[in-house]
Amino acid sequence: MFTSVLMIEKALTSADVEFVTTLHGDEAVSFHVLLQPRGDQADRLLRAIDDLALGELDEAARERETPEGAEAREPGQRALEVSLRALHGAGKEARGRLIEAHPLDALKSLVDEVEADEVIVLTDPHYVEEFFHQDWASRARHKVGVPVLKLFSHRKA
């Protein structure tokens, strides 16, 4: 069985599930999902810039309303559960956890633990981080020891 670690930052949409579950054709794939709850307030400006770059003015204005840090844990857990149910509904084996520590350390640890064949980083576009190669996928390529595929999540189900 092929083992993928799927790193996400929000609940998977139905389009996301179809996207990741069809990447390997008919090959059996098990997913180990890592969800990064919202970070601290320092990330807020970068997210607002990304929203503006995508023309999502309403999203940029609502950044202040989104739970962050410890307050983001409960919504993050719900998003993880929704994502796991969606993967199970697509007939895939899937387990998951929230990222408690530094995201790349958690990713490297899980890749080693499950002997993953690949990492899929599925996030919204993060233009500032990507420009400076500080996004998760760029940094993970130098740390995890397996191929890293970067995909953009779908905004709507």
Image: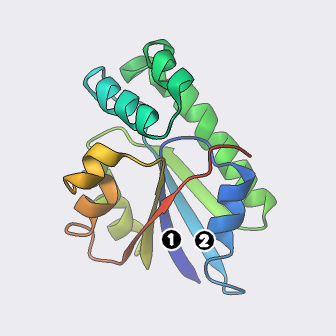
Name the mark on residue 4: 1
Q: Nearer the viewer, residue 79 or 115?
A: 79
Q: Provide residue 115's location: percent of width, then percent of height.
A: 40, 75
| Three-letter code, disc 2 | Ser
Label placed on residue 30: 2
Mark yes or no: residue 66 visible: no
Q: Observer-nearest residue: 79 or 97?
A: 79
Query: Image quadrant of residue 46?
Result: top left
Disc with the residue nearer the chain's start (2 vs 1):
1
- Residue 107: % across, % down: 34, 57
Residue drawn at x 75%, y 59% is 88
Q: Is residue 157 in view?
A: yes
Tell me the residue at 53%/31% (across/down). 56
Residue shown at 74% from the left, 46% from the top: 157
- Which element carries disc 2, helix, strand or loop? strand
* Residue 156, x across and y down, in percent: 69, 43
Q: Are marks 2 and 1 in contact (CB under 8 Å)?
A: yes
Give the mark count: 2
Residue 11 against residue 37 in the figure, above or below = below
How far apart marks 2 and 1 lie (CA) works out to: 6 Å
In the displayed structure image, the side of residue 33 where residue 79 appears, left or right: right
Secondary element at tag 1: strand
Query: Left or right of 147: which side holds 62?
Result: right
Tell me residue 120's x, y (percent): 46, 65
